[in-house]
Amino acid sequence: MKLNIENALRFVNQNEYTEMCKKAQEKLTVLNTGTGEGNDFLGWIDLPNSYSDEDIEDIQNVADRMRKLDCVVIIGIGGSYLGAKATIEALKPHFEKMGTEIIFAGHTLSGNYHAELIDYLSDKQFGIVVISKSGTTTEPAVAFRLLYAEMQKRFDKETIRDRIVVITDEKKGALRTLCDKEGFDDFIIADNVGGRFSVLSPVGLLPIAIAGFDIEEMLHGASMAQDICLEDNVKNPAIQYAAIRNMLYNDGKKVELMVNYNPRLKYFAEWWKQLYGESEGKNHKGLFPASVSYTTDLHSLGQFVQDGSPILFENVLWVNDDSDAPVVPHDDENLDKLNYLEGKNMEYINSKAAEGTMNAHVAGNVPNIRIEMDTVDEYNLGFLMYFFEIACGISAYILNVNPFNQPGVEAYKKEMFRLLGKE
Ligand code: PA5
């Protein structure tokens, strides 16, 4: 992974940036030594190297069993599904179906979504992985109740036991009680790992393994990132990223746009949005994390980015891989006037669109951060996710907020429960 902040640095005062880097280094120490707010939620820092061979084998064995089914429904919301969804969407082919189908549920209360899902599953051999740390979150709990009832209509107890896996707290929550009563296979979400920092725990690893991807490579990438991102050094990319985004925030930028030029990374941005939005958006502070897919969205939001309220900066995730890009063919008639692109591959054209967009946006007062990776694979995703997690912890501490709680999420729940008549 290569972080390039040149086109953001030119918008800030260099001395102030140096000071901000020093502050970021101090905050990294606070994170590393567990002396900051929310320090009982730092278990994720050591996740990359926390697995024994037996732990990996346990995950892989359950995954292999589930992979024999037609499809597996992953039930969860927020941090209990976004890491897996982001990784699977980034790694799976755009069109071709591969192996066991992975379906997500419990991340929406849409009746229509779940009605169609029940219908779709009615002639399939399906399994369920239900993920909820608290074990009481309404969206996944309702979805699980619906799909569990469907299973009970069609399969005997033993088959059901083979097809349901629970990932929840070791001791508490309704899901724990049900899991213990029915004897389902389970994995534990450690007390000190919060939802949005749990992608490298079984919360992310089991669904990713069921989808057929290499979880050891992902942990390997994360472990490399751990070596680099915990270093108390101004060259540490997590320090630089945390520092520059806080500089831009202090200078009036209020929205950070994560940009991709590859639809595979659309859900990666969703994962990142939750990580930063829920960790930093507190006490009336924080950058609003948003995302766009270019060049698609240049034809819808490009106008605003270039010319609208000057509150944005961009964070471009660029992938260098052009190995399978088709080449523009020659056309004798050249009616579309595209022969000037003859022999060029699509990724080359994409890269020039990215370069041109950056030049135009930077000239339009939109600072640009660029993160490059060679290819989208398990190793690089593991690396990138760990990098963003560490940078998030540092960045939230710079803002002076606790990165690991989410008190604001309770307000909607309280109101919803009142309207639903929950006692
Ligand atoms: O990051 C978080 O802590 C949240 O987004 C949770 O992951 C989300 O609310 C789901 O919670 P739970 O896993 O308890 O069902």
Image (cartoon, rainbow, N blue to C red):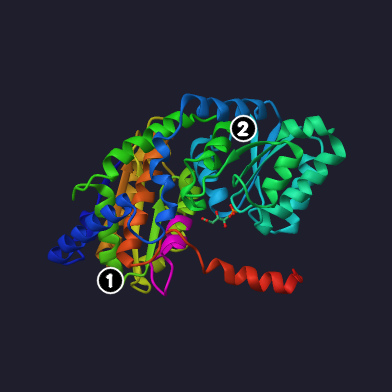
Name the residue tied to disc 1. 250
Front of the two marks 2 and 1:
1
Tell me residue 165's x, y (percent).
67, 37
Q: Nearer the viewer, residue 291 or 63?
A: 63
What is the three-letter code of the residue carrying label 1? Asn
Q: Earlier in the sequence, mark 2 or mark 1?
A: 2
Is 409 on the left-hand or right-hand side of 27? right
Q: Residues within 10 Å of mark 1 (few under 14, many from 20)?
A: some
Residue at 57% in and 48% down: 81
Q: Is residue 64 above or below residue 172?
A: above
Q: Residue furthest front?
A: 171
Magenta range: 274-289
Tell me residue 395's x, y (percent).
32, 59
Tell me residue 412's x, y (percent).
61, 70
Q: Tell me the quadrant of the picture where the C terminus can be found.
A: bottom right
What is the three-letter code of the residue carrying label 2? Lys
User: Does any portion of residue 315 appear in the rendered image?
Assistant: no
> Ligand 1 is in which quadrant of the figure?
bottom right
Give the structural element (helix, strand or loop) at label 2: loop
| Residue 189 is inside the magenta segment | no
Residue 320: image quadrant is top left
Cβ at disc 2 under 8 Å from ligand 1 = no
Q: Tell me the quadrant of the picture where the N terminus can be found.
A: top left
Residue at 78% in and 34% down: 160
Q: Is residue 419 above or below residue 341?
A: below
Q: Nearer the viewer, residue 54 or 345?
A: 54
Tell me residue 3's x, y (percent).
27, 47
| Alpha carbon distance from label 2 to label 1 | 46 Å
Name the residue tied to disc 2. 97
